[in-house]
Image (spheres, grey):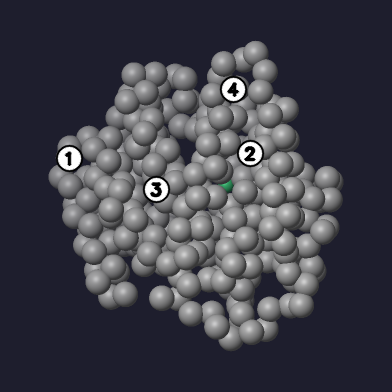
C-alpha cells in the first residue's frame, strides 16, 4: 500500500466537494459534445478520447482505492482523470492529429482551455495546483525533478492510469489498424510500415525512455509504448497490466522476429519482477 498519511493530515481546510466533481463532469461532457459533427473521422477521434477519459475515471478510482487514498484524494484523482486530456479536442479540430510532435503539446492546450473557462477557480489554491501540475506533465517523457507530496503522488498516478488505458486503446484497435492503416495515419502521424527501428528496440532493452520524435513507424510507436512498463510507478497498475494481458496483446501486433521476442521476454521479466518486489 502506498502511504501518504502525513500528507493527509496536512490537507487544507477547504476541500473539494462531491457537488464540484459533479459540476466538473457536467461541464466536461457538455464541452466534448460540442466537437461532434458530420465528419465520421472527426467523430471517431473525439469519441476515442471521450471514452478514454470515461474509462480512466473508473480505473483511477479503483487504483486510488488500492493505494488507500481518502475520499477527498479520490475526488481529486477523478478530477485529474476527467480533465487530463481536455486539450485533445481542440488539438484534433485544429490539426487533425493527436501527435504532439509537429502540432502542440495537448497538456498545455488543456490547461489553457481550463483557464479560459475558469473551470478550476472554485478549488482551493492547493488543489488547483495539484490538478494543474498533474495535467501539465502527464504526457511528458519524464516528470520534472523536485515534485513532492501530493503533487508528486497525483502526477505519478495520472501518468500510470493514462498508460494503462492507452494500452487498452491500442490493443482494441489493432485489427482495424492492420486493415485500415491509412485511416490512422493522420491521427498518429506514423506510417503503418512493418518495420521496427533498431535504436528503439535497443532503448527498450536498456529501460531507456524514448523521445517520440525518434519514432519512424507505427511499430516503433508500439515498441516505445511497451517500454512504458519500466516507467510505471505503482505496483497496483502493473498488476492490472498483467491481469488484463495488455503486454501480450501489444506484442501480438508486432512482427514475430528475434528482436521482438527479446523485447517481450525483457518486458515480462521487468513486469513480474517489479510486481514481486511490492
Ligand atoms: Fe494525454
Query: Does the Cβ of the disc 1 residue fall within 8 Å of ligand 1?
Result: no
Foreground tag (1 vs 4)? 4
Front one among 256 and 40:
40
Give the mark, 2 or 3, whose residue is nearer the N terminus.
2
* Image-based side of 176 in relation to 43, left or right: left
The label on residue 225 is 3
Q: Secondary structure at mark 3?
A: helix
Q: Is residue 63 visible?
A: yes
Q: Which residue is mark 1?
A: 257
All told, the count of numbered labels is 4
Could you tell me residue 153's position as x and y percent? Answer: 55, 70
Nearest to N terminus: mark 2 or mark 4: 4
Q: Residue furthest top?
A: 38
Question: Which one is earlier in the sequence, the residue at label 1 or at label 4?
Answer: 4
Residue pictured at 59% horizontal, 55% vertical: 78
Q: Respond yes or no on whether mark 2 lies under 8 Å from ligand 1.
A: yes
Q: Earlier in the sequence, mark 1 or mark 2?
A: 2
Name the quadrant of the C terminus.
Answer: bottom left
Mark 4 — residue? Answer: 43
Is residue 196 found left or right of 56 in the rendered image? left
Q: Residue at x 64, y 84 (%)?
A: 9
Q: Which mark is residue 221?
A: none
Q: Which residue is mark 2?
A: 88
Amino acid at each position: 500500500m502506498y502511504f501518504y498519511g502525513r500528507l493527509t493530515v496536512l490537507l487544507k481546510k477547504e476541500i473539494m466537494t462531491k457537488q464540484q466533481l459533479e459540476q466538473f463532469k457536467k461541464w466536461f461532457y457538455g464541452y466534448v459534445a460540442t466537437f461532434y459533427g458530420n465528419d465520421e473521422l472527426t467523430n471517431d477521434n473525439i469519441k476515442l478520447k471521450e471514452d478514454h477519459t470515461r474509462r480512466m475515471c473508473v480505473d483511477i478510482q479503483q487504483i486510488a482505492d488500492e493505494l488507500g487514498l481518502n475520499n477527498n484524494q479520490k475526488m481529486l484523482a477523478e478530477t485529474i482523470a476527467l480533465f487530463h486530456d481536455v486539450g485533445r479536442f481542440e488539438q484534433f479540430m485544429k490539426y487533425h492529429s493527436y501527435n504532439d510532435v509537429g502540432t502542440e503539446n495537448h497538456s498545455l492546450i488543456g490547461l489553457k482551455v481550463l483557464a479560459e473557462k475558469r473551470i478550476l477557480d472554485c478549488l482551493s489554491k492547493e488543489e488547483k495546483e495539484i490538478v494543474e501540475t498533474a495535467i501539465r506533465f502527464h504526457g511528458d517523457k519524464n516528470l520534472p525533478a523536485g515534485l513532492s507530496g501530493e503533487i508528486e503522488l497525483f502526477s505519478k498516478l495520472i501518468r500510470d492510469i493514462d498508460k494503462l488505458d492507452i494500452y487498452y486503446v491500442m490493443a482494441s484497435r489493432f485489427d482495424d489498424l492492420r486493415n485500415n492503416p491509412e485511416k490512422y495515419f493522420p491521427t498518429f502521424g506514423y506510417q503503418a510500415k512493418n518495420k521496427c527501428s533498431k535504436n528503439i528496440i535497443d532503448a527498450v532493452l536498456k529501460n531507456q525512455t524514448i523521445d517520440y520524435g525518434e519514432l519512424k513507424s507505427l511499430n516503433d510507436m508500439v515498441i516505445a509504448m511497451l517500454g512504458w512498463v519500466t516507467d510505471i510507478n505503482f505496483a497496483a497498475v502493473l498488476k492490472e497490466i498483467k491481469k488484463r494481458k495488455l503486454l501480450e496483446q501489444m506484442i501480438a501486433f508486432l512482427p514475430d522476429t528475434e528482436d521482438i521476442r527479446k523485447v517481450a521476454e525483457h518486458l515480462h521479466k521487468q513486469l513480474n519482477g517489479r510486481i514481486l518486489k511490492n
